[in-house]
Image (tube, coloured by chain):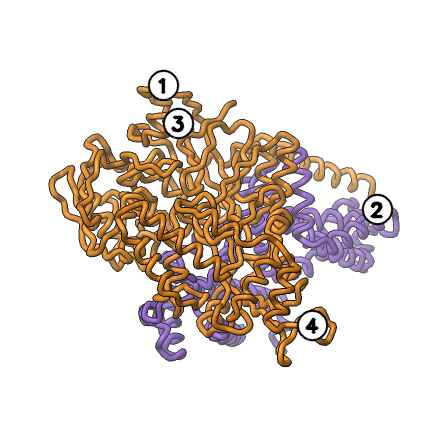
Chain colours: A orange, B purple
C-alpha cells in the first residue's frame, strides 16, 4: 500500500520535472523581447551594414528622468544622447561640427549666438523641427518645471537671457555675460532639443515620455526593470564625424537596469546583455582573457578622482604638510590595486584628456615618502612617543575625512595606509552623502573626495575660486587673487590661447600650493560581447550606440 | 463574533496609525538633510537650500507635516517622489504585482516541495528517506537566500542556460529561479511541519479506525491524515505570506526584478522621504491585513478562541 503511494508521489514529482523542462521552450534570451521588433531595415543613402537585432545593455543606475534638460546624472546623459540631438556636435577630438544647426555665428562679445537650423529634421512624434523648438527647450530648462539640472546650471551660471526666434529656421540665443564656451556646451546632451508639442502634452511627465530627434525613439520604461528604445527609421542627420550616416544599425536597444555588479556580470555571461557597464575589474579582465568579452575603457576628462585638502584647518593649513600628503601616496600602485590594469593614476587637478591640461603642473610631485617625512619634521611634526604617528605640542597629526564609503571603498584603506606610513593619523568617518555634506558645511573636515567629468577645465572655477568658499564647492578654502583672476578670465575670455594660459596658471597655483591630493583618473568601463561591433566613446566617455551593430 | 470582528478591526487600525506615525518620525531622526540629497554636493548655496526646504514643506512643524501626510494618505495620495516627481502611489502600484507574483509562487514552491517531502518523510518515518529529507531541510534552512540564489543562477542560468538570471514579469521562466530561491527555505520549514503534523495525526484513533474499516491506504493518507495535518501548516503559511513579502527584497535585488522590496531599498538610499513612507505604509498595511484576516479565519474555524 505504502509503496503505491510513493509511486503516486514520484509521478507527481516527475510531472513537476517535465513541466520544468517545458520551461526550456521559453529560453532566457527571448524573454526580454517584450516589445515587438521594429519594421524591416530602411535603405540608407550611404549603405552601411544594417545589422538589425536587439542590443541589450546592462546599466548600473536607473535614470531619474529622460528629459535631457532636467537631467543631472551621467546615466541620464548617456541614454538621452540616443534620443536627442543638440544644436552642434562635438567630435571626440573637440572640434565643432553641425548638429541640428547648419551654421552658427557668435557676436563679438560671445554673448549672443545665432544658429541657422537644418530644414529636413522631424521629431519622433512627427512634428517638424523649427526654431520654436529651440526656444521651447531652452525656456523649459530655465523654467520652474526644472528644479536643478546640468543644463539649468549651464544656462543660469552664464546669465541666460532669452532665445529669440528670428524666423522658422533661425534662432538667436542671448546671454547677459560673455560665454565663449557656449558653442561647446550647445553640443552637450543637457542642452539638446525636445519636441515643443511633447513638452506641452506631457508637462510634468515629460521625463518619462521624452520626444527628440535622435537616432532612437523612446518606447517604454518599466521602472526598476528596463528602458526600451527603437530605431528611428527617418534619422538622416548624424554628425559628419560619425562612423556611418542614416538610421542606427540595430533595430532596438533594451537597457536593463541591473544595479548589482554581480547580477550585471552574470547577465553578461549568460548572454542576456551584450554590453555591461562598470564591470568589476578582476572579472572583466578574466572574461577578456578568456576571449568572451572586450574591455572598453575611457579615462574621463575633467577633474580626476582627487581629495581636496582643507587649507584653513590645522594641520593642513601648512603647505608643507599638504605637500607631504601628496608625496606620501604612490598613485601608480593605488590605481593598480584599486582597479587592476583598468586604473590610470592621476598627478594633477585635471586629467590628461581634458582641454587645457598642463603637463608641468602634473610633474611637481613624485612618490617619495622620505621627502614627505622630512617636510613633516621640518614643520615640527615628530613621532615623540614611538607609536608611528607624529605629534606636535601634544596635538596629533590628524586628518579628518568624513566620507561616504560608496565612493571610495576601492581605495580608501590603501590611501589611509600610505598616509599612516609617514605618520598621519587618518580619522576616516563613514557616513552617507547628506551627513558628510553637513560636516563639510560645518567645516569639520580635512579631506573631501571629488571628481567631475567635463571636457574642459571649467569646473576648476566652482572648486577653487574664492567666491565659492562658503559651501559653494571650493572646499580647500584657499584664497589667492592670481588664482581667482585666472579662473574668472578662463571662463570668459574669448581668445582660446589666453584661456589656455589662464588654466595653466590655475593648475600650477593649485598644485604648487598642494591643494589637492590627486589619485586616479575616473574611468568609464564597459565589457562587450564578441558579437558587438563598432563600439566607441564620445567626447565625454559615453558609448555611442548609434554606430553599434551586432554580428550573428 | 461580530463584536470580536469590530474589536479586531479597531486594533488593526490603531496599529496602522502607530506605524504611520513611527515611519514618519523615524525618517526625520536620520542624520542628514533631504535637501542635500536633492541638490548634491555641487554648488549649493544657503538660499537654494532654504528655497527648496520651503518648497518641500520641510519648514513646517513635524505635526503639521504629519497631519498633512496622513490626510492625503487616507485619500490614496502618498505624495510625489522627491527624486523624480512621480506619484508615489503609482510607483508602488507599478511594483506591487511583481512582488505579489513572486511571493505567491514562492508560497506554491514552499507548499508543494515542502508538502511532498514532509509527507514522504513521515510515511517512511525512521528510514533513510526520513533522514535524507530532514537533512535536506536543515540545509535549506541554513543556506542564506543570497547564496541559494547564486547557486541556482550558476546552475540554471550560467551552466544550463535554461532560465534568465535577470527576470521581470510573471512568466514561468521569469519566476522560476526567484520563486525557488525565496520558496526553498520556506519549503524546508513546511517539510518539517508536515512531517511532525502527519506523524501526530497518523497515530490518532480515527486513522486506526479508518484503516480498520478497510479504507484504501491512499484514501486514509490523503483524505483523513493529510487534510488534518495541513491545518497548522496552512495557518503558518498565512502568516509566512507577509514574511515572504519582506524576504522578496533580497531576491528582487539578486535577480534585478521589479518589486516593492527593491523600491524600498532604492528610495532609502536616495533619501526619497515620501517614497519610503509610502512603501512602508503600504507594506505594513498588507501585513496587518493578512494578519487580521488570518485571525478572523482562525476564529471562524475555531470558535473556542473567541471566548478568550
- From the image, which quarter does the N terminus of chain A lie in? top right
Q: What whole-number distance in Å separates the C-alpha atoms at marks 2 and 1?
A: 67 Å
Report whether mark 3 lies on the same chain as mark 1: yes
In the rendered image, residues at marks 2 and 3 fall on the same chain: no
Sooner in the amino-acid sequence: mark 3 or mark 4: 3
How far separated are the C-alphas under marks 3 and 4?
Answer: 61 Å
Q: Nearer the viewer, mark 4 or mark 1?
A: 4
Up-down relation of residue B294 to residue A4 (above or below): below
Asked whether the beta carbons under mark 2 and mark 1 sit within 8 Å of each other, the answer is no
SS at circle 3: loop
Q: Residues within 10 Å of mark 3 (few under 14, many from 20)?
A: few
Q: Are marks 4 and 2 on the same chain?
A: no
Q: Residues within 10 Å of mark 2 (few under 14, many from 20)?
A: some
Q: Secondary structure at mark 2?
A: helix
Q: Which mark is residue A47?
A: 1
Q: Which residue is mark 2?
A: B129
Q: Nearer the viewer, residue A409 or A104?
A: A104
Q: Which mark is residue B276?
A: none
CB of mark 3 within 8 Å of CB of mark 1? Answer: no
Q: Work out whether mark 3 precedes mark 1 in sequence or the reverse, and give the earlier one.
A: 1
In the image shown, does B239 or A369 lie closer to the viewer?
A369
Check the residue under mark 4 and report the chain it is in: A
In the image, is A73 to the left or to the right of A390? left
Is disc 4 surrounded by few (<14), some (14 to 19) or many (20+) residues within 10 Å?
some
Q: Is residue A344 left or right of residue B190?
A: left
Foreground mark, 3 or 1, reads 3
Which residue is label 3 attached to? Answer: A243
Give the image location of residue A351, x and y in percent.
47, 48
Q: CA distance from mark 4 to mark 2?
A: 69 Å
Q: CA distance from mark 2 to mark 3?
A: 65 Å
Amino acid at each position: 500500500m505504502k509503496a503505491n503511494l510513493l509511486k503516486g508521489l514520484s509521478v507527481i514529482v516527475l510531472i513537476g520535472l517535465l513541466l520544468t523542462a517545458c520551461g526550456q521552450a521559453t529560453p532566457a534570451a527571448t524573454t526580454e523581447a517584450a516589445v515587438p521588433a521594429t519594421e524591416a531595415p530602411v535603405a540608407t543613402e550611404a549603405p552601411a551594414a544594417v545589422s538589425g537585432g536587439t542590443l541589450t545593455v546592462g546599466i548600473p543606475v536607473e535614470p531619474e528622468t529622460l528629459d535631457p534638460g532636467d537631467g543631472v546624472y551621467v546615466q541620464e546623459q548617456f541614454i538621452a544622447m540616443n534620443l536627442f540631438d543638440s544644436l552642434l556636435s562635438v567630435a571626440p577630438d573637440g572640434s565643432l561640427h553641425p548638429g541640428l544647426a547648419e551654421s552658427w555665428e557668435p557676436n563679438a562679445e560671445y554673448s549672443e549666438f545665432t544658429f541657422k537650423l537644418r530644414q529636413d529634421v522631424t521629431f519622433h512624434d512627427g512634428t517638424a523641427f523649427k526654431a520654436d523648438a529651440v526656444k521651447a527647450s531652452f525656456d523649459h530648462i530655465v523654467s520652474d518645471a526644472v528644479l536643478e539640472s546640468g543644463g539649468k546650471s549651464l544656462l543660469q551660471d552664464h546669465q541666460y537671457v532669452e532665445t529669440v526666434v528670428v524666423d522658422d529656421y533661425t534662432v538667436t540665443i542671448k546671454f547677459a555675460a560673455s560665454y565663449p564656451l557656449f558653442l561647446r556646451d550647445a553640443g552637450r546632451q543637457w542642452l539638446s532639443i525636445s519636441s515643443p508639442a511633447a513638452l506641452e502634452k506631457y508637462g510634468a511627465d515629460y521625463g518619462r515620455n521624452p520626444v527628440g530627434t535622435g537616432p532612437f525613439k523612446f518606447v517604454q520604461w518599466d521602472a526598476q526593470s528596463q528602458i526600451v528604445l527603437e530605431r528611428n527609421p527617418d534619422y538622416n542627420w548624424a554628425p559628419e564625424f560619425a562612423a556611418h550616416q542614416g538610421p542606427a544599425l540595430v533595430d532596438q536597444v533594451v537597457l536593463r537596469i541591473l544595479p548589482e555588479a554581480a547580477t550585471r556580470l552574470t547577465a553578461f555571461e549568460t548572454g542576456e546583455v551584450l554590453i555591461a557597464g562598470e564591470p568589476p575589474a578582476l572579472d572583466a579582465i578574466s572574461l577578456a582573457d578568456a576571449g568572451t568579452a572586450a574591455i572598453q575603457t575611457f579615462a574621463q576628462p575633467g577633474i580626476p578622482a582627487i581629495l581636496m585638502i582643507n587649507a584653513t584647518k590645522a594641520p593642513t593649513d601648512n603647505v608643507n604638510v599638504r605637500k607631504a600628503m601628496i608625496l606620501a601616496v604612490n598613485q601608480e600602485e593605488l590605481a593598480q590595486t584599486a582597479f587592476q590594469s583598468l586604473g590610470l593614476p592621476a598627478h594633477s587637478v585635471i586629467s590628461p584628456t581634458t582641454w587645457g591640461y598642463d603637463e608641468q603642473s602634473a610633474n611637481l610631485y613624485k612618490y617619495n615618502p622620505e621627502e614627505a617625512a622630512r617636510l613633516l619634521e621640518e614643520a615640527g611634526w615628530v613621532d615623540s612617543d614611538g607609536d608611528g604617528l607624529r605629534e606636535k605640542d601634544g596635538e596629533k597629526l590628524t586628518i579628518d575625512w568624513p566620507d561616504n564609503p560608496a565612493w571610495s571603498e576601492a581605495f580608501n584603506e590603501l590611501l589611509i595606509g600610505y598616509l599612516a606610513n609617514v605618520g598621519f593619523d587618518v580619522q576616516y568617518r563613514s557616513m552617507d552623502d547628506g551627513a558628510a555634506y553637513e560636516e563639510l558645511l560645518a567645516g569639520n573636515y580635512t579631506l573631501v573626495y571629488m571628481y567631475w567629468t567635463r571636457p574642459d577645465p571649467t569646473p576648476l572655477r566652482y572648486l577653487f575660486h574664492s567666491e565659492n568658499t562658503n559651501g559653494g564647492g571650493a572646499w580647500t578654502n584657499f584664497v589667492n587673487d592670481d588664482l581667482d583672476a585666472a579662473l574668472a578670465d578662463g571662463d570668459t575670455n574669448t581668445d582660446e590661447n589666453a584661456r589656455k594660459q589662464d588654466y595653466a596658471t590655475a593648475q600650477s597655483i593649485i598644485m604648487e600650493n598642494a591643494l589637492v591630493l590627486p589619485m586616479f583618473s575616473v574611468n568609464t568601463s564597459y565589457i562587450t560581447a564578441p558579437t558587438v561591433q563598432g563600439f566607441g566613446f564620445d567626447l565625454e566617455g559615453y558609448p555611442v550606440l548609434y554606430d553599434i551593430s551586432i554580428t550573428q | 463574533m461580530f463584536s470580536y470582528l469590530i474589536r479586531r478591526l479597531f486594533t488593526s487600525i490603531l496599529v496602522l496609525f502607530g506605524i504611520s506615525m513611527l515611519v514618519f518620525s523615524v525618517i526625520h531622526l536620520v542624520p542628514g538633510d533631504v535637501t542635500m540629497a536633492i541638490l548634491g554636493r555641487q554648488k549649493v548655496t544657503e538660499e537654494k537650500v532654504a528655497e527648496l526646504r520651503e518648497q518641500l514643506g520641510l519648514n513646517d512643524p513635524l505635526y503639521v507635516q504629519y497631519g498633512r501626510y496622513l490626510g492625503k494618505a487616507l485619500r490614496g495620495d502618498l505624495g510625489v517622489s522627491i527624486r523624480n516627481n512621480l506619484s508615489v502611489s503609482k510607483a508602488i502600484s507599478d511594483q506591487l504585482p511583481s512582488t505579489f507574483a513572486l511571493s505567491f509562487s514562492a508560497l506554491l514552491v514552499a507548499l508543494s516541495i515542502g508538502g511532498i517531502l514532509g509527507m514522504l518523510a513521515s510515511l517512511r518515518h525512521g528510514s533513510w528517506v526520513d533522514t535524507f529529507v530532514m537533512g535536506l531541510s536543515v540545509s535549506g534552512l541554513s543556506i542564506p537566500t543570497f547564496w541559494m540564489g547564486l547557486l541556482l543562477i550558476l546552475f540554471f542560468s550560467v551552466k544550463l542556460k535554461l532560465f534568465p538570471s535577470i527576470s521581470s514579469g510573471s512568466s514561468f521562466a521569469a519566476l522560476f529561479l526567484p520563486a525557488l530561491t525565496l520558496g526553498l527555505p520556506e519549503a524546508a520549514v513546511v517539510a518539517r511541519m508536515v512531517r511532525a503534523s502527519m506523524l501526530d495525526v497518523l497515530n490518532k484513533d480515527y486513522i486506526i479506525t479508518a484503516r480498520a474499516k478497510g479504507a484504501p491506504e491512499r484514501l486514509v493518507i490523503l483524505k483523513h491524515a493529510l487534510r488534518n495535518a495541513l491545518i497548522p501548516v496552512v495557518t503558518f503559511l498565512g502568516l509566512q505570506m507577509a514574511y515572504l513579502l519582506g524576504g522578496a527584497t533580497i531576491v528582487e535585488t539578486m535577480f534585478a526584478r521589479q518589486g516593492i522590496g527593491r523600491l524600498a531599498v532604492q528610495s532609502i538610499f536616495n533619501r526619497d522621504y515620501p517614497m519610503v513612507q509610502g512603501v512602508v505604509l503600504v507594506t505594513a498595511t498588507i501585513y496587518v491585513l493578512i494578519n487580521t484576516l488570518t485571525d478572523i479565519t482562525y476564529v471562524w474555524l475555531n470558535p473556542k478562541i473567541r471566548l478568550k
